[in-house]
Image: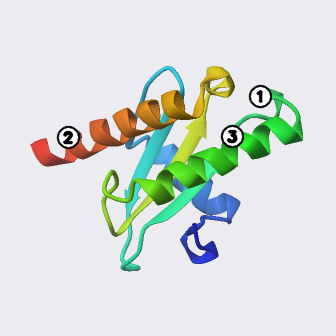
Amino acid sequence: MKKENIVQKSKDFDRIIKKRNGKSNNYFIINKEENNENKTKFGITFSKNLGNAVTRNKLKRRIKNIIDQNNKIYEKNSTYIIIAKKDAIYLSYKQLEEELINVFNKIKGDNNEK
């Protein structure tokens, strides 16, 4: 994932999360906002009590890799905030990928109905 595709400002995180325009499952909450930047942006966050720094960074790297490998699961011109829940650290890479894709499909399906 390129640096230009990462949401870094906390005010952007707060704005998107407060809109509560997203979907969730037992492992992830994904909030979405349309943008006019002609690119897709991602922000990944979770609580500090999720584990130590090594565990959190491993989870973040895995999520970034899943996003890079599955670029058809998300819509272009959108900003996504991915919030990982505590149970996500116990999943294998394959399970993590399946759960993340399921939530993205929920968001995509919700937009197709509108």
Residue 87, image x and y in percent? 63, 20
Q: Is residue 77 above or below residue 96?
A: below
Q: Is residue 42 left or right of residue 88?
A: left
Location of mark 3 (residue): 59
- Tell which circle, 3 or 2, labels the residue nearer the N-terminal end: 3
Q: Please tell me how crowded label 3 is: few (under 14), some (14-19), or many (20+) other residues with Cα within 10 Å.
A: many
Pick the residue in front: 4 or 8. 4
Question: Label 3 to label 1, Cα distance in Å?
Answer: 10 Å
Question: Label 1 to label 2, Cα distance in Å?
Answer: 30 Å
Residue drawn where x is 67% and y is 50% of the image? 61
The residue under label 2 is which amino acid type?
A: Gly
The residue under label 1 is which amino acid type?
A: Leu
The reply to whether discs 3 and 1 touch (Cβ–Cβ < 8 Å) is yes
Q: Quadrant of residue 39?
A: bottom left
The residue under label 3 is which amino acid type?
A: Leu
Residue drawn where x is 57% and y is 34% of the image? 93
Q: Which mark is residue 109?
A: 2
Report helix, strand or loop for mark 3: helix
Location of mark 1 (residue): 50
